[in-house]
Image (tube, helix red, strand yellow):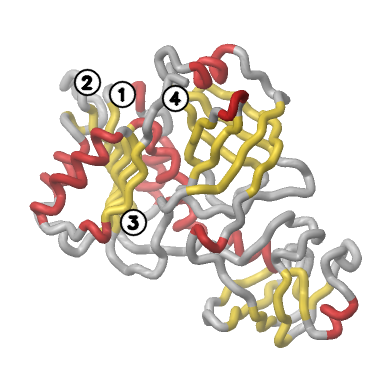
Amino acid sequence: MSYSVKIEPSGHSFTVESDESVLDAGLRQGINLPYGCRDGACGACLGKLKSGQVSYPDGPPIALSDEDEAQGMAVFCQAHAQSDLIIESHEVEGSSDIPIKTLPCRINVLKRLNHDVMLVRLKLPEAERMQFLAGQYIDFLLENGRKRAFSLANAPNEDQELELHIRHVENGRFTGQVFESLKVKDIMRIEGPYGQFFLREDSDRPIIFMAGGTGFAPIKGIIEHALAAGITRPMHLYWGVRAHEDLYMHELAQQWADDYAHIEYQPVLSEAADDGGPGRRGHVHAAIMADFPDLSGYEIYASGPPVMVYAGRDAFPAQGLDLDYYYSDAFEFSND
């Protein structure tokens, strides 16, 4: 059975099935309620139940004291709706609303996506979760105080694992380890989430995504979050790479365009021969400029190599883009 949930003071609403928690239902539909462990122990998701009834199928959660319950509070990661609900809860709107955590993790999946990109999935401890905004990144904490940053490629509602797309950097110490010696079940330490590269959901402007190489990773997370949240603003995805083999998730991007009328996808290849294969030829920022002579009403999310990000920043204002609406994540590749 389905029930409605209204959040105060935002006025946002969503539906919840009787066999899922209020938090899980919200995250599934792109509602960023706060949480920590998702196990009922930390209390980060504690909020006010203003109207309606909930139950706790696994018993009263640790974080819900008798005093909290008497005051009408509920632990939303464990609470299951028994009626329509009105709840009072803070909603996560920016990176400052999310605590930075240092956590161990286990390598759960290592899968080559092409000749130089590895899909890495990280599993956190059972009693832990890392809340994040789609598009943010984490740091691997390495020996001697070294850190290596990688963008999260999954949407926040799918946080059972953390997904990364790691490109092999020539002579790169850490990426060499990922491709040559890292094994499933190896234990690592991570810290995060970090970064200001996330979807501004209070805007109604059409969006242009400009990805370069593995800059596709955070944009993938943002698009998947937008789809979960039911956001239907026009979205134009341009993915710039050198050659066809670098489009390591081309089928997924094409599927978005096929399935959703508000999403368009254009691969752009800078070094491929004009052999009739998919995609335009040239530089990705130039393709955007050719297609959008007037950028004044748009916002652009750019992620990938610094040369691409800065080329767009320098060129787009000539066609009307307000740089207040240019959100970027420049990947500084390291040999460390």
- Callout 3: 10 Å neighbours few (<14), some, many (20+)? few
Task: Determine the residue positioned at 29% across, 29% down.
Answer: 241
Q: Who comes first in sequence, dot 4 or dot 3?
A: 4
Calculate the distance from the C-alpha at mark 2 to the C-alpha at mark 1: 7 Å
Q: Disc 1, disc 4: CB below 8 Å?
A: no
* Dot 3: element: loop
- Callout 4: 10 Å neighbours few (<14), some, many (20+)? many
Question: Where 42 sits versus 47, above or below?
Answer: above
Q: Which mark is residue 244?
A: 1
Quarter holding residue 80: bottom right
Q: Residue 203 or 187: which is nearer the viewer?
A: 187
Position of residue 264 measured from the top left corner of the image (x, y, whole percent): 29, 49
Q: Given the image, on which type of amino acid does mark 2 rest? A: Ala
Task: Determine the residue positioned at 61% across, 56% down.
Answer: 99
Position of residue 31 measured from the top left corner of the image (x, y, whole percent): 56, 66
- Kindly tell me whether residue 213 is visible in this rendering: yes
Calculate the distance from the C-alpha at mark 2 to the C-alpha at mark 3: 29 Å
* Dot 1: element: helix
Q: Who comes first in sequence, dot 2 or dot 1?
A: 1
